Image (cartoon, grey):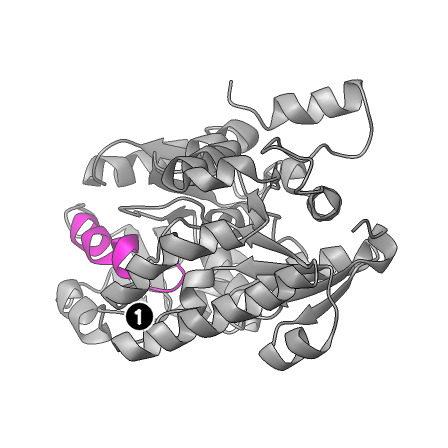
Amino acid sequence: MTTPATTMRVSMFPKHDPGNPFVRRFAASLERAGATVDDFSYVRALRRRYDVLHVHWPDSHLTSASWWGSLVKHLRFAALIGWLRLRRTRVVWMTHNLSAHDQCHWLSRRLFPLWFPRACTHVVALTQSGLESARERYPVLAGKPSAVVPHGHYRHEYPAVPARDAARRRLGVPPDSFTLLFFGNVRRYKNVPHLIEVFRQLPGRDLHLIVAGQPGHGISAEALSALRDGDDRVTLRLEFIQDADVPTYFGAADATVLPFDSILNSGSVLLALSFNRVVLAPRLGALPEIQQRVGAQWLQLYDGALTAEHLQALRTSAPPIEIEADLSAFDWNSVADRTLELYRADPATTQGAPARPRGEGASYEKVRKQYSKP
């Protein structure tokens, strides 16, 4: 099957996610490049013919609280993919993470590696190190066409950022404080309780911490409020943040802190950089590779556990907010081109080599070197 990019028919799993603008922008970039992208549904996948089923976070669609629910979901999805493979539809797995961040039934965790990595025909990773990690965890992926497609930025996705003083007035943050921001869904692996505990070790009234995001999966608003213990230097906005309000939080912040205890890729890092806010995060997963592209002054990485000293150091190392981070390596047009190139790669003839970008010779070598480890 060889389908021109202008007529490529894609079923996206999912195309829209209210809590994650990445999938929306990713689908839109493919549509601008000429592809037709539908939001996945079982009915459409059975009735219509697609060239590609593109799967984000498959584990999130396969988990259930019970063993029988997990089994039914796995069997249903596996049967559908078997049907699509018979129709020569390519099944592309975008490896945002290698295992579920949140707890799921043990049966689902056991079933997933037994069949899904084998069932997909192509694999996309957001970084070279992410691709290598995926192949190490699931060796069967080494024999499939693959591509490194960087996570696109979020510039122009949100309304304009308000002035700092106005943003701080809206959030009740002192106007002259050095303000740190954690932004995103509050999950166990993001280590927010530890961030609050470490921040409270810092002396001085001229520091502030904002935690903005919806808790879930074992993290409660009550527990986080108890950790704050009346410290008015900590502002908790433990709710889903609407898109229109996102710029206010970054407008009020001097720097962003993301103290993950495990991570492969992070859209939160690209979101903060898109608002030109320095990010402090652990040296884990693909973050060192992202740091190489944006510079250590924008993505500051630490080893081990987050400490008060790490937070204190941000005061002198954060770039002025008037400076713009260079995110040219995360351009959405490039994201679409490389993805469509992978879609066209024939799994019968491509033996696990990264999909070759458009263009030959020097242009390909430039891309290959950019997305290879030093």
Q: What's the magenta region? A: 183-199
Q: Nearer the viewer, residue 275 or 193?
A: 193
User: Residue 118's x, y, as percent?
Assistant: 48, 50
In the image, what residue occupies the spot 19% across and 52% down? Answer: 194
Secondary structure of the residue carrying tag 1 is: loop
**Badge 1 local density, few (<14 within 10 Å), some, or many (20+)?**
many
Q: Nearer the viewer, residue 352 or 297?
A: 352
User: Which image quadrant for residue 311?
Assistant: top left
User: Which image quadrant for residue 357?
Assistant: top right
Q: Is residue 80 above or below residue 194?
A: below
Q: Is 265 displayed left or right of 305 in the figure?
A: right
Q: Nearer the viewer, residue 108 or 1?
A: 1
Residue 185 magenta-highlighted: yes
Residue 285 magenta-highlighted: no
Q: Is residue 171 above or below residue 178?
A: below
User: Total number of numbered labels?
Assistant: 1
User: Residue 224's x, y, as percent?
Assistant: 20, 67
User: Residue 346's x, y, as percent?
Assistant: 71, 42
User: Which image quadrant for residue 114?
Assistant: bottom left
* Dominant secondary structure, magenta: helix
In the image, what residue occupies the spot 65% across and 76% down? Answer: 46
Q: Is 62 displayed left or right of 362 in the figure?
A: left
In the image, what residue occupies the spot 69% across and 27% down? Answer: 367
User: Residue 35's x, y, as percent?
Assistant: 80, 59
Q: Which residue is mark 1?
A: 215
Q: Identify the amino acid type marked 1.
A: Pro
